[in-house]
Amino acid sequence: MAAMYDKILVSLRTPIIKYGERTLQQAIDITKTFGGKLFILHIQQEGGYFESIQKETEGIVKRMAPDLDFEVIVTSGDLIDCMTGAIRDNKINLVVIGARRRGALDSLLDGIVDIDFSGEIIKKIPCSMIIIK
C-alpha cells in the first residue's frame, strides 16, 4: 500500500535560515514520517538568483536530513499559479506552508502565506494542506 502522503510540497521564501527553517524542518519531519519525497518550492521575482537559491536550499536540506529524497523547484510568477502548477506536475498530495501575519502583497512577493490570504490558497489548492504558524 502506498503512503498516504508520498509527495509533499513545501513553499519557502529566502533566506531559509531567516524565514523558513521551522517550516522546512516540519516538512522534513512529515516527509520522513510518510517515507515520501519532499519538493521545495521557491517563488522568486523575475531576475532572481535562481541557481544560487537552488544550491543554498540543497545544502541546507542535506545538512538537516542527509538521507531525504527531495527536489528543489525555483520559479517565478503568481503564488497560486506556481503552487498549483508544481502540485499538478509532480502529483503532490500534501502541501506544507508557513504562515506569517503580513500584507497579501508582501506574501505574494516573498512566497510566504499571509494568515488572511491562506483562505484563498485553501480554496484553490487541489490537495491536503498544513499551515505552520
Image: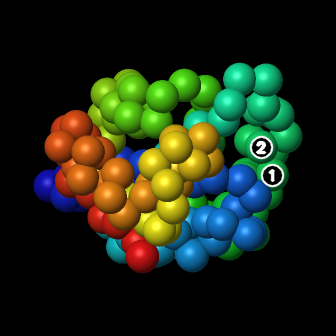
Work out whether 29 lies above or below 122: below
In the image, residue 62 lies at what x, y percent? 72, 62
The amino acid at mark 2 is Ile
Quick check: 101 left or right of 111? left
Helix, strand, or loop for circle 2? helix
Q: Quadrant of residue 36?
A: bottom left
In the image, residue 44 lies at what x, y percent? 66, 35
Q: Is residue 50 visible?
A: yes
Disc 1: which residue: 56
Residue shown at the point (60%, 41%) measured from the top left: 109
Task: Name the quadrant of the C terminus.
Answer: bottom left
Quick check: 55 left or right of 95? right
In the image, residue 100 lies at what x, y percent? 49, 67
The amino acid at mark 1 is Glu
Disc 2: which residue: 53
Q: Quadrant of residue 30?
A: bottom left
Helix, strand, or loop for circle 1? helix
Quick check: 51 left or right of 95? right
Q: Nearer the viewer, residue 60 or 36?
A: 60
Q: Are marks 2 and 1 in contact (CB under 8 Å)?
A: yes
In the image, residue 67 lies at what x, y percent? 61, 64
Q: Nearer the viewer, residue 89 or 126?
A: 126
Q: Quadrant of residue 72?
A: top right
Residue shown at the point (66%, 66%) measured from the top left: 19
Task: Name the quadrant of the N terminus.
Answer: bottom left
Alpha carbons under labels 2 and 1: distance apart: 5 Å
Tell me, what colour scheme is on the image? rainbow
Work out whether 97 lies above or below 39: below
